[in-house]
Amino acid sequence: MPDAGYSSDEMMTIAAARMIRNGASLFVGIGLPSAAANLARLTHAPETVLIYESGTIGTKPSVLPLSIGDGELSETAESVVSVPEMFAYWLQGGRIDLGFLGAAQIDRFANINTTVIGDYRKPSTRLPGAGGAPEIAASCKEVLIALRHNKRAFVNKLDFLTSSGHMEGGDSRERMKLPGKGPTAVITDLGILTPDPVTRELTLTSLHPGVTAEKVVESTGWPLKVAPKLETTAPPSETELRVLRDLNERTKRAHAGQA
Amino acid sequence: MVRDGDTVALEGFTHLIPFAAGHEIIRQRRRNLTLIRMTPDLIYDQLIGAGCAAKLVFSWGGNPGVGSLHRLRDAVENDWPAPLALEEHAHAGMAAAYAAGASHLPFGVLRGYLGTDLPKYNPKIKFIECPFTGEKLAAVPAHRPDVTVVHAQKADRKGNVLMWGVVGVQKEAVLAAKRSIVTVEEIVDRLDAPPNAVVLPSWVVGAVCAVKGGAFPSYAQGYYPRNNAFYKQWDGIAREREGFQQWIERHVMGTKDFDGFQRSLEAAVKHA
């Protein structure tokens, strides 16, 4: 999309932000989830309660944090709790509406891998690991996942299952008695995938402007199901783009400077 | 207080990471340590690259917002400078293990790990049935470090320690340990701690040591911000073995203490 006036990453962040409803409590990971969550808070969802795993609840950062526990987060938080309290009372306690995760690999049932590429004991790439993700994926009422769409990420079989999505599909997640509903949407730089209501297999339901279904299918490592009635994602509005770019610019300035 | 072969926890969740103490462990050439920490961060990247560690117990091993910890990856992927055994958890499991350690309970319990591959590779993650409801829950053995080191904002002359802001698992990690060391930004006559602030009373703390700026490049709320630029720079410093070794030799091994380290870094920036 050379002449769209926005990048595919901006479209992804904005599409993800739109999924956040005003007033929801939201457990946010660093990176794209954090950008999308703050964009939502600065546009259509000002009452969103942002929670980061460092223990900061109801935080309102003016720049995006580089780490999950930047001072900016605790200084603007309504409450700061210890990490054991965060994971026990707030997350496992089932108080959080929406979890928002990234991933290195995802499969057709939206199970995700953030641990290793290759064999666990002799990995070709050692990734950071689980962090808070397994219990975010398990205990938040709903989960959103955002990542770039390509065959390395959208794989037929995960090298490691770090965080549970819809397991083997159908009612397998319910049978495992995971508390939350699991992933309800996967937002990529090409479109939006949602789980089929019965099989729970990810289905392409929306294409970002200028993207073809063939392109998405080609970028997926399993035979991707495409919804019979495909929607087109609304392009970024001027306000969305302006707020996102301002946020990124402020962040860049804040993180630069002398080491 | 840290001996070869010890199990050591240097805690601080992004905030108040005890870098000065970590450097001193490197200077003293401690070896064969089992390092426990939720987020290894640059501090364990340094200890691992410097050859201090035999085993890592952790739940998220990246450079936050930047990318990989290259020294950790090199140890796991290529056994350099030595093989590193991993005991890998999720944050919720680590938090439960520390809380159990602080309670001197044998294990922590959590609603976690369901459906994930982590229990296949970490035999310390087990599942139990709730005796009251029958719910399947995860259990992890308590963390009981030989030594825990944390950094805090201040202590008074008796050794009572005050910290605030993102307090992570520091309190649990200190109470779980057999011995503990707290480095602080300053030692004051009166703590003036507000009620409910995190105060570690002197009788649960082994030793207190004033190290101004001792959490750099992480931060101490109320004193100095996180040096995000350094976290980004670390990616280049630690990417190759040679660059890392030169940095450690020059700025850590080649200096006497954390003041010396900071002066050495400043001099390097001036000459850059």
Image (tube, helix red, strand yellow):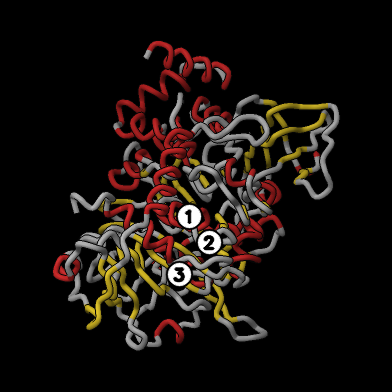
Q: Nearer the viewer, residue B134 or A132?
A: A132
Badge number at residue A45:
2
* Residue corresponding to mark 3: A143
Q: Label 2 is placed on what type of residue?
A: Ala
Side of B203 where A130 appears, left or right: left
Whole-number angstrom distance, CA of label 1 to CA of label 2: 32 Å
Q: Chain of mark 3?
A: A
Question: Where residue B82 appears, x then y in whole percent?
Answer: 35, 40
Q: Nearer the viewer, residue B72 or A51?
A: A51
Q: Secondary structure under badge 1?
A: loop
Whole-number angstrom distance, CA of label 2 to CA of label 3: 17 Å
**From the viewer's perspective, is residue B64 above or below residue A171?**
above
Check if mark 2's residue and mark 3's residue have beta carbons within 8 Å.
no
Nearer to us of marks 1 and 3 is 3
Asked whether the viewer can see residue B34, the reply is no
Q: Label 3 is placed on what type of residue?
A: Val
Q: Chain of mark 2?
A: A
Side of B262 where B195 appears, left or right: right
Residue plotted at (36% across, 35% down) = B235
Residue plotted at (45% across, 24% down) = A258
**From the viewer's perspective, is residue A148 above or below residue A24?**
above
* Residue corresponding to mark 1: B59
Q: Are marks 2 and 3 on the same chain?
A: yes
